[in-house]
Every structure is written in structure tokens, then in C-alpha cells.
Image (spheres, rainbow, N blue to C red):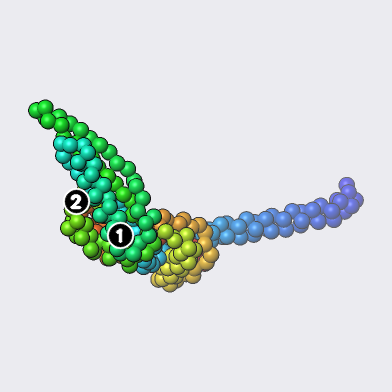
Amino acid sequence: MEERVTRFGGPLLVAAAILAIGMIVGGYLLGNGLVRAHHADRAVTVRGLAERDVVADLATWDLSYSEQGTDLAEVQARIQRDTQSVRAYFQKLGFPADALQPAGASVNQFYNNGVSTVTINQRLQFRTTDIPRARRAVADQFDLVNAGVQLQDGSKMNYSFTKLNDIKPPMVAAATKDARAAAEQFAKDSGTAVGGIKSATQGYFSIEARDGDSGGFGVADTPFKKVRVVTTVEFYLD
């Protein structure tokens, strides 16, 4: 019996030592993994803003006007005269003939006490990339009134900025930089440091009037725009 203890005591001790070491190492790795997991949960979510002033590169103007009377031929003649006056107005300002395109027309006829009244509505669309000259066309539009053209409500110039894709990458980078600055301030106040990005969400780009005019009903649109984007970024904290 004593010989068996002596014979197998060595291997049993080695196995027990290996098991003990494995438990120690496993416990260390488990504990270190929990520390790392806890560290990975430390994050801060901030928003970054980027704005840029731009000038519109496209101007469009839907010009709607109408004539009314009891004789169809006479009303047609007056609406043709108005159309010629509109074309002459833009030609005088130096725009090519194709800057104006027909955008629709309608004829309405109704009877009242046996009398027929005809109304013809005409619409032309003006389109140009010459923004300074387009602004002049708006400023001098009273000349159309003097020529007998009565523009209907809603006939106003609209300015658009079409090169958004060209400025998206630098604006997203600027918004992300702004978000990191906010995260660094938070980390400084809490005694930590900012690490890498855990997640990020890009907000939508908005283009509005630079000086606050919305361009709504009764308000003239402006070619001076402000592009804005807000990003939401989650940073790790070290």
C-alpha cells in the first residue's frame, strides 16, 4: 500500500498543480475579460454641428397669368400678347429664348344669365444658372405689369443649391470634429480620455435661407442659403 502511494504520488501532485495553475490563469483571464468588458461599456454620445453658407446655382420661376372675356378669339389674342411681352422682357435682360419653356395652359368657360365667359390660363417656366441676372429680373418685374401682364399669386422666383454632394464629405468631417471636441470636454470634466468611435449616425442635410427668410407665401426667396448637418457620434472613454 505504501509503495502505491509512493509510486503514484508524483503524477497526482503534478496533475493537481496543473489544475490549480489552470484555475488561477482562467480566473485571471475571466477577471481581466470582465475589466475589458466594463471598459468597453464606457462611452459618451455627443452631437456635432457643421454649417456652411452657399449661394444658389439655379433659379426657376413659374410665371402664371390669365386673361378673361366673353369672346374666345379676343381672349386668345390677349393671352398671346402677354406671352410675347414676357418673352420680350427676358430677352431684353439678355436671357436666351430657351430660358423660357411652356409649362401648361387651360381654358375655362362658364355661363351666367346666358352670357359665356372664357378664362385662359397660361404658364411659362423660366430656368437659369445666371443668378445675378435672375435677381435683376425679379427686381424689375413691375415692367411686366406695365406691359399689361398680371402675374398670379404664387408666381415667384425660387433659388436652389444643387451642388450638395460636392460639400457633403468635408461637412460630415467638420461635424464629426465638432462632436469629438464636445466629447473631449466631457472627458476632461470627468477625468477620462476620449478613445475611438463606437458608433456614428449622420443626420440629414438641410438647406435654408441664410438670413432666416423661409421663402413661404408672400416672402421672396433668396439665393443666399445655409447648409446644415448634425451628426450623432458615440465615443469610447479610456
For the residue pair 38 and 226, the one nearer the viewer reads as 226
Give coordinates of residue 102: x percent, y percent. 34, 47
Query: Callout 2: few (<14), some (14-19), or many (20+) C-alpha neighbours within 10 Å?
Result: some
Q: Of marks 1 and 2, which one's residue comes earlier in the chain?
A: 1
Q: Is residue 1 left or right of residue 79?
A: right
- Distance Cα–Cα, label 1 vs label 2: 16 Å
Depth check: 129 or 224 in front?
129
Q: Residue at x 24, y 42 (%)?
A: 76
Instruction: Locate residue 128 relative to residue 200 in the image: left or right.
Output: left
What is the x, y in percent for residue 99? Answer: 37, 56
Q: Residues within 10 Å of mark 1 (few under 14, many from 20)?
A: many
Occupied quadrant, residue 127: bottom left
Residue drawn at 19 percent across, 44 percent down: 67
Q: Nearer the viewer, residue 144 or 229?
A: 144
Q: Is residue 8 visible?
A: yes
Tell me the residue at 52%/62% (across/down). Answer: 197
Q: Is residue 43 left or right of residue 97?
A: right
Q: What residue is shown at x 42% (from left), y 59% (from top)? A: 162
Q: What amino acid type is highlighted by mark number 2?
A: Gln
Judging by the rendered image, the residue that carries numbered circle 1 is 90
Expressed as whole percent of the image width and height from the top left, the position of residue 117 reads 16, 35
SS label for mark 2: loop
Amino acid type, mark 1: Phe
Q: Quadrant of residue 160?
A: bottom left
Front-most of 100 and 226? 100
Which element carries disc 1, helix, strand or loop? helix
* 14 to 77, vertically: above or below: below
Q: Is residue 172 visible?
A: no
As drawn, the label of residue 150 is 2
Tell which residue pokes out farthest to the top in this image.
Answer: 114
Residue 14 coordinates in the image, percent (x, y): 81, 56
Furthest residue to the left? Answer: 113
